[in-house]
Each structure stands twice: as C-alpha cells, then as structure tokens.
Image (cartoon, grey):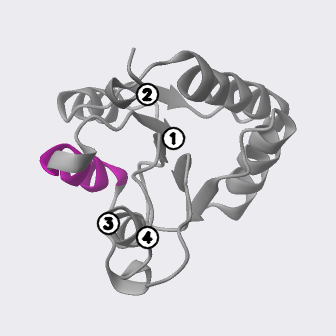
Amino acid sequence: MSEFRAVDILYAEDSVTDAEVTLRALHKVNLGNNLLWVKDGLEALDALLGRGSYAGQRRTAPRLALLDLKMPKIDGLDVLRTIRATERLRSLPVVMLTSSAEKADLVASYELGANSYIVKPVDSTRLSDEVARLGYYWLLINRLPESGS
C-alpha cells in the first residue's frame, strides 16, 4: 500500500487552460496544496473509489469536488450521480464548475444533488477571482458533518 495522501480538493477538468487558471487561483490563496487534478470523469471516479491507477492508494475522501460538466469518458453529471449513490461520498460537497449556462444542465445538476453550480466566466481574471472565493468558502467557512460542527 502506498503512502497516505490527504486530498482537500478533487478537481475534474479536461481543459488545460481552465485548469491552469483554477490551480493558480487556489494556490494564490493557499488552498491548492492538497489538490488532485484529474482530466476526465473516469479518472475522477477512479480517484474517489480507489480503483484503476488509484487502487491501493491510502487517502481520505476529499473535502470538496469541483466537476466540469462536459468531460471525456464520463461526464460530470454521471460522476455526481455516482458520488451521491456511494455511501461514504454522499455528503461530499460538489460544485459544478462549467462553461455551460444551459438551464437543462443546471436543473439536472441540482436534481442529482450538486451543492453549487457556477458558470465559468470567459475572462480569466474573473474566473480566478471566483475560484478563489469558492475555495475559501467551501474549505474554510463551510462545515461538514465530520468536522464536529
């Protein structure tokens, strides 16, 4: 079994450009150190469920999942569906961080149990600011059942 690794944020995003902006924003506010970036929905589920290349890795469930909606292999809605159907992941806060402003995507995300739905701004400065705020809220202000509050 490999060395234990804590992950605060699981970030599923296939766009390298969007990922770089998001990662910089989270590091800038000291929230990106324990982040796992995966590039598709299958890798996100493998990391969350400890299978595939993540089999045998010791880790706790992340404190936050940021999911893009439109990803290769498995889309964000299917990842969200699996998270909510998995007992140990059910209370994991999930933020849909997507370029889709489609009402159907927003409604489907909330129906499946998303905690938040954020449409990524086209402007990288605004995206950076919004990611920093959401990271601050979900990791420093929000309380999870396991935190004792």
- Is residue 56 positioned above or below 31 on the image? below
Q: Amino acid at mark 2?
A: Tyr
Estimate the x, y position of residue 145 in percent, counting from the top left.
32, 25
Label drawn at residue 58: 4
**Mark 1, residues whose alpha carbon is within 10 Å: few (<14), some, or many (≥20)?**
many
Estimate the x, y position of residue 69 in percent, counting from the top left.
41, 48
Q: Secondary structure at mark 1?
A: strand
Q: Secondary structure at mark 3?
A: loop
Q: Residue at x 32, y 66 (%)?
A: 74
Q: Residue at x 26, y 27 (%)?
A: 110
In the picture of the structure, the residue carrying the numbered disc 3 is 74
Mark 2 and mark 1 residues within 8 Å of each other at the beta carbon: yes
Q: Amino acid at mark 4?
A: Arg
**Mark 3, residues whose alpha carbon is within 10 Å: few (<14), some, or many (≥20)?**
some
Relative to the observer, which residue lies in front, 119 or 27?
27
Q: Amino acid at mark 3?
A: Ile
Q: Which residues are magenta?
A: 76-86
Real-space Cα separation, disc 2 to disc 1, in angstroms: 8 Å
Real-space Cα separation, disc 4 to disc 2, in angstroms: 30 Å
| Mark 2 or 3, nearer chain start | 3
| Mark 1 or 3, nearer chain start | 3
| Mark 1 or 4, nearer chain start | 4
Say which of marks 4 and 3 sits in front. Answer: 4
Label drawn at residue 117: 2
Estimate the x, y position of residue 149 in percent, counting from the top left.
39, 14
Residue 83 colored in magenta in the image: yes
In the picture of the structure, the residue carrying the numbered disc 1 is 98
State which quadrant residue 95 falls in.
top left
Relative to the observer, which residue lies in front, 125 or 135?
135
Label drawn at residue 31: none
**Mark 4, residues whose alpha carbon is within 10 Å: few (<14), some, or many (≥20)?**
some
The majority secondary structure of the magenta stretch comes to helix
